Image (spheres, rainbow, N blue to C red):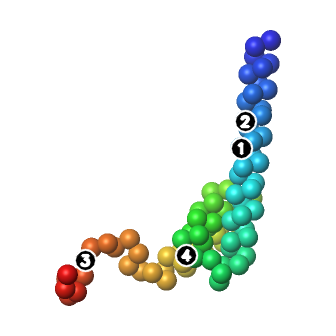
Amino acid sequence: MKPHLSVRKHSARDAARTDWIDERRREARAVVADVVHHSDHLIRLACNVLVQHGETIEEREDARILLVVVDARHPTRGNHRPDPEVGS
């Protein structure tokens, strides 16, 4: 009887995880669909969700490409070294 309860708990947890991922995927698609009204940070988050959890290969690849485009708009992103020509 105990294994049956364990399977039931595992099944409920899997269902909750699937529902959570589905909701994040819907949110990510909404952000990508209206990219001009969202920050680059939010677009990156949405793209990362779709790259990992997109339903099709095309959706994952499109998200990866959009991520490259967004990152290319800020080539020095992540470079936090101070500019020597700017006085402090």
Kindly identify the amino acid type of the residue bearing the numbered disc 4: Asp
Q: What residue does disc 4 label? A: 40
- Does residue 22 lie above or below 10 as drawn? below
The picture places residue 15, in percent across and down from the top left corner, at 78, 40
User: Which quarter shows the N terminus?
Assistant: top right
* Secondary structure found at label 1: helix
* Secondary structure found at label 3: loop
Kindly identify the amino acid type of the residue bearing the numbered disc 1: Arg
Nearest to N terminus: mark 3 or mark 1 = 1
Q: What residue does disc 2 label? A: 13
Disc 4 and disc 1: Cα gap in Å? 27 Å
- Does any portion of residue 14 appear in the rendered image? yes
Please report contact status of discs 1 and 2: CB closer than 8 Å, yes or no. yes
Answer with the quarter of the image where residue 14 lies: top right
Q: What residue does disc 1 label? A: 17
Kindly identify the amino acid type of the residue bearing the numbered disc 2: Arg
